[in-house]
Image (cartoon, rainbow, N blue to C red):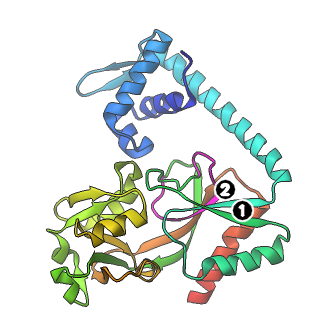
Amino acid sequence: MDAHLRDLRYFVAVAEELSFTKAANERLFISQPTLSRQIRQLEISLRAKLFERDRRTVSLTKAGEVMLAQARLLLAQWDETRHAVAEAAAAQDTTLRVGFQTRIGRGLIPGVTARMARLLPGWKLTFRQVSWQDPTAGLAGSEVDVAVAWLPVPDTGRLSWRVVATEERWVALPVDHRLARRSTLSLTDLADEPFIALPAAAGPLRRFWLAAEERSAPARIAAEAETAEETFEAVASGLGVALLAAGNAETYRRDDVAFRPVTGLSPSRLAVVWRTNDDRQAIRIFVDACFQCLCTEAS
């Protein structure tokens, strides 16, 4: 059986980190058992042991060292090929595909569309909602050309971003929740509340929306949601509470959910994100248009 590019990326991540745990959690955003299983399948396919591992250490075998050099070469060649094909297709394509995970709102799209029409006549924008399962908002798999997404996104060197809005974090509660009577809350007030979390695949973004860095103890997870709509349905049903950006409190306003500001938390950042090697003019214009529409108005 031939290896997939995904298997090569998995192998390179482990080989560079020399840690299955670090590769799984910090680079690939998958579970360690899944990663171990995929590497084992790769070894079986190649009929070669690629790693020496015990409870404390991971090291490359001689076969693994050869594999690392070849895998890096193959992945680089594939990235070059994909980029060349994308450029050729883009030369004939006048559609910019925009990914998002929560409703964009904030008056951004009408403003950006108007600016794009002036600067790139004939181009059109299409929009695709992407599950929280993909922390790159569709960019890694080339489902979209650019995304309007909340930071953090995976810091792999393959993505670039520009912050276009900074907003306080609020909390969504069932409208009849005892804390909904308060005008402002702190993380201490919410410490014992069950939370609706992003899926584990969301990686650092899941931790951010659980305020993991500001907590003295891990959050209690009541359920996971793959979209913002699922999150608010879970909140409305009384399963738990969830953090969100202040602007989204208005965007997702509904009668069965209460939204309150939370003090003492670092702000959330909305950014335009694109693939670092995508230097098309349309991308630059879209990024600048988003910045001008939100940041210029805010100032």
Q: Residue at x 72, y 62 (%)?
A: 283
Q: Residue at x 44, y 43 (%)?
A: 27
Residues tagged 1 and 2 counted as in contact (Cβ below 8 A)? yes
Is residue 227 something one can see in this rendering?
Answer: yes
**Numbered disc 2: secondary structure:** loop
Q: Amino acid at mark 1?
A: Ile
Q: Residue at x 41, y 13 (%)?
A: 49
Mark sitting earlier along the chain (1/2): 2
Residue toward you, 194 or 272: 194
Horizontal side of 197 relative to 116 (left or right) equals left
Horizontal side of 98 relative to 91 (left or right) equals left
Horizontal side of 229 relative to 81 (left or right) equals left
Residue toward you, 75 or 121: 121
Is residue 212 something one can see in this rendering?
Answer: no
Q: Which residues are magenta?
A: 139-154
80 in relation to 231, above or below = above
Q: Which mark is residue 145?
A: 2
